[in-house]
Amino acid sequence: MSDFRNEEDALRRALDDAASHLPVPDAPLPVTLTDASRRRRRRTGVVLLAAAVAASLVVVTLVVALARDDSGKQVEIGTDGTQTVLAALAATVSSGGYDLDFTFRSEMGDSASESSCHPVAGATPGETRMLCTSTRPTDVSGHGTVNTNPYAMTVVSEVSGIGPVTLFVNGTTVWQLGGANYGTGGTFEGAPTGASLSGFASLVEGTIGPGQGALSMMSLANNSGYLGLEASAIESAVTDGEGTLGDGTPVTYYSVTVDVTKMADGEGLTDEQRQAISDAVATLQSAGYAGTEERVGIDDAGFIRDVTASTKFADGSSMTRHTVFSNFGCAARISMPNESAVGGSAGACPPVAAATTAVPTTSTTATTTTVSSPAR
């Protein structure tokens, strides 16, 4: 209430100030007015009144265009930010790698039902997976690391109803320890070869639902991992406020319009990645995909730090994903289960700030950790 009163007072002061700058006629001269001059005098009054109204509208428009967010700052809402988002995406991917923390929730709609789920054969001998014909509520949380050159990701998750799951993925192959143990047989010993990236889709979609699973496959198959963005798919972006992350980092938010059908057009994708994304698009369309709202937070150094994506489907079911990114360039170099650990960081540490976003650079103290597959 106090914020509203403060903004109301500010609006009133602005209107008063605008009115004070309007021209004030001098005292009337002692002359005799003819009918024509009286008409001119009335027209002058109308012009002055119109000027006052116009000035008021300008002030009102200016005040309405400013919104106050939780950080107490004022930011202009709705201005074009497409190039800023594209530059931030390029800088984030070009950093070589980053760490991430995420939460994910899939919910059933009013017309959806939790139908029977039954085990079916997995991609390799001895594996099984659950196949469900409709969406069931699922909560997932965890952390991970992404390398972008070449693409590799490892994620440690806690999945409701399943338990802990560790995932390794690159441009062609998936290894899953926990859950259905896709591509591993339940162990990393013996340097298993893993299983195909596109083949993992039936397991994911069978676990959390076709549409939600298809979106998850897109996050696995693109070269930014759980960042889930490709420049080819970004259609537009507008400013959407400012805020502060949990670690105190200030960010500017953008509402981003994404065309998921263009995700497979991203540069540097393998044939397996394109196949997985194309299959996911087809599944989304058959699942009644009704669009995704993306809100992207960019820090002062020009990196994407926060992404919230909300998706709805025709049956009323939905999926919400929130991911926070950090440690750009300093994230650990990932080794797949069939590779020897190499150690080191994924890129330049600390990375070069994204000068193309025309924002000031903030200094950070970087830490480096090592991520590799369990000892074999």
Image (cartoon, rainbow, N blue to C red):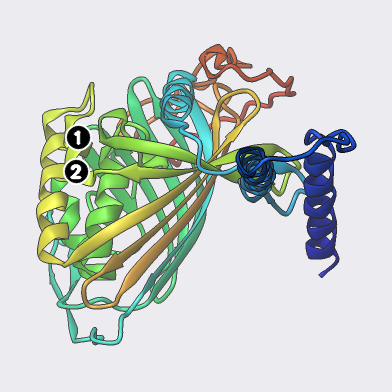
Quadrant assignment, res 90: top left
Question: Looking at the image, which residue is at 36% across and 20% down?
Answer: 149
Image quadrant in which the C terminus is located: top left
Q: Is residue 114 left or right of residue 364?
A: left
Q: Is residue 108 visible?
A: yes
Label 2 sits on what residue type?
Answer: Leu
Give the mark nearest the N terminus, 2 or 1.
1
Q: Is residue 216 left or right of residue 94?
A: left
Residue 145 in the image: x percent, y percent? Answer: 48, 37
Residue underneath mark 1: 172
Quadrant assignment, res 190: top left
Q: Is residue 244 visible?
A: no
Residue underneath mark 2: 197
Q: Is residue 222 left or right of residue 68?
A: left
Residue 364 in the image: x percent, y percent? Answer: 73, 23
Residue 163 in the image: x percent, y percent? Answer: 44, 69
Question: Looking at the image, which residue is at 71% across and 49% down?
Answer: 246
